Image: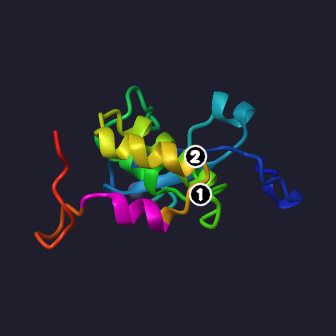
Amino acid sequence: MRRDLNGRVTMPLYEYYCQSCKRRVAVRMSYSEFDCAHPKCSYCQSDQLQRLISRVRVSRSEDSRMESLADPGNFGDVDENDPRSVGKFMRRMGSEMGEDMGPEFDEMVGRLEAGEDPESIEADMPDPSGPAAGPAPSL
Ligand SMILES: [Zn+2]
């Protein structure tokens, strides 16, 4: 009674673990089919299938946070040529990290958001990567 021949593409995919051949099996069926379904393994035709519960994100781990940072879809509206847009992006990134990024970061973001040229901001910033950087920030 599978009706996926009429081009129905909205049927959910259910994941099972086949205890017989130890493989993961994905079974596509409608919700009503699922109610009374006894799906069979598509590899060995065994019905010893154990439903795999889809992973639910209870809390966002460090990894998934970094993933979301790396996902261009999250920050896809950044216009690299617009300092304000970059500043907004960096502020969002800073709050996403959940860390205090330090006064330099705040200052840089503030100046970006004010529309300053990123290059001149960068020139003002102490360079942590080399000893040849400008004068140490006075306290
Ligand atoms: Zn199997």
Q: Position of residue 25 (x, y in %)?
A: 47, 54
Do the residues bearing badges 1 and 2 touch, measured as CB atoms within 8 Å? yes
Quadrant hosting residue 34: top right
**Which colour style is shown?**
rainbow
Question: Is 66 placed left or right of 41 in the picture?
Answer: left
Q: Which amino acid type is marked by label 2?
A: Glu
Magenta-highlighted residues: 119-126
Q: Residue at x 78, y 47 (%)?
A: 1
Residue position for label 2:
113
Q: Residue at x 30, y 35 (%)?
A: 99
Q: Is mark 2 within 8 Å of ligand 1?
A: no
N-terminal of the pair, mark 1 or mark 2, is 1
Task: Choose between 64 and 88: the one closer to the eye.
Answer: 88
Q: Residue at x 31, y 55 (%)?
A: 22
Q: Position of residue 98 (x, y in %)?
A: 35, 33
In the rendered view, tell whether residue 135 sits above or below residue 92: below
Q: Residue at x 73, y 40 (%)?
A: 30
Magenta segment main secondary structure: helix
Question: Is 119 placed left or right of 10 in the picture?
Answer: left
Question: Is 72 placed left or right of 19 in the picture?
Answer: right
Residue position for label 1:
83
Quadrant hosting residue 16: top left
